[in-house]
Image: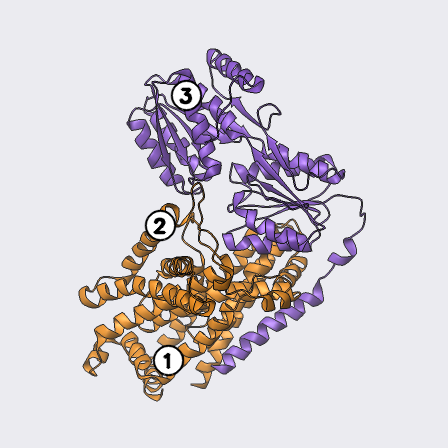
Chain colours: A orange, B purple
Amino acid sequence: MKLKVKSSWVVPLVAILAGFIVGAIIMLIFGYDPIQNYSSLFDGAFGGVYSIGETLRNMTPLILTALGFAVASKAGFFNIGGSGQYLMGWFGAIVVALKFSFLPGWLLIIVSILAGALFGGIWSAIAGVLRAYFGTSEVITTIMLNYISLYFVNFAVKDWLAGKGSDSSPNIAAKASLRGDFLENLTANSTLHWGFLIAIIICFIIWFYFNRMKSGFELRSVGINEDAARYAGMNVKKTIIMSMLISGLLAGLGGALDGLGNFQNISVSNALPQVGYDGMAVALLVNYNPIGVIFSSLLFSALQIGGMSISVYSDTPTEIVSIVTASIIFFVAIKYVIELLTKRRKKNPQKTAVKNEGAGE
Amino acid sequence: MKKKATALLAATLMLGTILVGCGNKNSDSDKGGTKHTVALVTDGGGIDDKSFNQSAWEGMKAWGKQHDLKKGVNGYNYAQSNSDSDFTPNVNKLVKAKYQTIFGIGYKLAPVIEKTSKQNPDTHFAIIDEVVKGRKNVASVTFKTEQSSFLAGVAAAKTTKTNKVGFVGGIKSDVITTFEKGFIQGVHAVNPKISVDVKYVGSFTKADVGNSLASAMYNNGADVIFHAAGGSGSGVFTAAKDKSKNGKKVWVIGVDQDQKADGKYKGGNVTLASAVKEVGNSVKDLANKSMNDKFPGGKVVTYQLKDKGVDLINDNMPESTQKAVQQYKDKIINGDITVKAE
């Protein structure tokens, strides 16, 4: 047991370091200066209040799409629909913020956020219902729902929300915005907004849900062994739908917060938002641990925001940062290979460990 | 769990300190203050999009070489936006890195330029394809693309044998509809009986959709397609090349840049002409003006046929068609024909 705890944080660290080293080697091969580039990366992500503000803002949707993916994964489902649920959440929040602008500010914000979360939740619950009652693979349905949401939102924005000749909705009223003078002054006009705080709180709620609540325990049991959970008298169908619903609620909330805090409107998108897929990597890096998600999303966000600075201060192409991020994910994937090898070696102790863990919490 | 969390935090911080300890050579390279530095922010997609962003970047590179500057903080540079949420940090990073003139390439950047220009009154900003009003440090650049599109329409009308031509747009918005409207006016100026099939991809980056739209148009009998679809337009070229390889001669009119190279296939070329929009020249022009303290802040600078800001470049037009295009061009420049943008 002790060894297991240790390896759970050693592996991501080794993966991160290896990713950085591979990135440095690639830079050296192509004749760029890794030390200068990594220092402008760090400076771009954490150097000064403005950079920190942007990094934290960029973290917000990442945290929530990662949590969404984590909840579904704990229940044993592969929810690839984070992008679509995020987009639906963004859309729902902006629609409500625009159409109910007569409400007082605090109520408008709450209603808009809830609407966004609900849009995302319903969207993934569709996949959950199909899975629970018809056994349809959630991988296929969530991928397809992604495309439906992309084209539906584009259509609705274009033909309903946007004015003539424009491809984006009008901006939401200032009272519906999650930005505030306080945060703007604090972070030298960065786009940091109050949604960040909400995202952090949600991390702790999900941790509590997983570890301290009956329904969270049922969810994990279904993930470990569906048949055993059914035999133990749990309502498996309900749990499947619940897990997909919560998963979508979280991703939708990510979209709502990003919409109300960062974008302030919604526009026609060329492609599905990348943040849905990045969230999967963020969750994987820390093995679906809700508190760990805070730190892994900080890392991803820092790489993304800091990465922009690399090419601003040197002639290194931004693709290098993508290579570093990709290397980290690659090395995390390798982690499963290592685990698989150790598992094979000592089959029996591992099994009892899993049992103990399941019963102990 | 706590352990894991603290460890990750510690690692991030540690890595940070190591990195900071190593670097920071940036500060002592700020010498030679007389040089003017410029940078641009893309509107999504890279500086190799074979279209809008690329021509802007090539203009900036040419300007930099002319003035003996290098890519980087002391010369010229670009920041690539991978999504709309990158706009604000990109612009702000360039401001922070002390680039003196910053270009927003594309109408999508207008709100960001408007906001950051308020916060940074000492930096010059330029916005392409959109107008930001009432800011003394922002110059707005627009192009009369309806004029070059009109000429594209003339070329298409002179070339078609089926009396059917097509238009494939990127995302329907004011900037792109001017291409459509200009093109239709040009076609109908030559022959009002020619029908124009208009379709929009709904994206600037979906070559596959551009391909299927164009294939459908060619199958329906259209034999010339004008595209204003950025990256999606490469699908139009693929469709035209496939058709031409199968023995049906069809054409594409390119956009923004000279797209002759995109039309090449074994046995010929499908690019009839290109309706260029000299974003690169406008970038060069504004960079020069800004350097010489003649920055047109608060003004709208319009580029048109007259000053070669837009044009129709010949790729494979026969001489008779070229002549017709030239005639209409003269008429537009003289003011005998006014092309409507809407």
* Residue mark closest to the camera, 1 vs 3: 3
- Rendering coords of residue B138 (x, y %): 65, 44
Q: In this picture, is A78 found above or below A4?
A: above
| Res A306 visible | yes
User: Which circle marks residue A156 in the picture?
Assistant: 2
At a point 57% along the width and 24% down the height, the residue shown is B305
Name the residue tied to disc 1: A209
Q: Amino acid at mark 3?
A: Val
- Rendering coords of residue B121 (x, y %): 70, 51
User: Which circle marks residue B187 in the picture?
Assistant: 3
For residue A29, side relative to residue B228 (left or right): right
Number of marks: 3
Q: Amino acid at mark 2?
A: Ala
For residue B182, side relative to residue A18 (left or right): left
* Inter-mark Cα distance, 2 to 3: 32 Å
Q: In this picture, is B116 found above or below B173?
A: below
Given the image, what chain letter belongs to the residue carrying mark 2? A
Q: Amino acid at mark 1?
A: Tyr
* Inter-mark Cα distance, 1 to 3: 65 Å
Tell me the quadrant of the picture where the N terminus of chain A can be found: bottom left
User: Which circle marks residue B11 in the picture?
Assistant: none
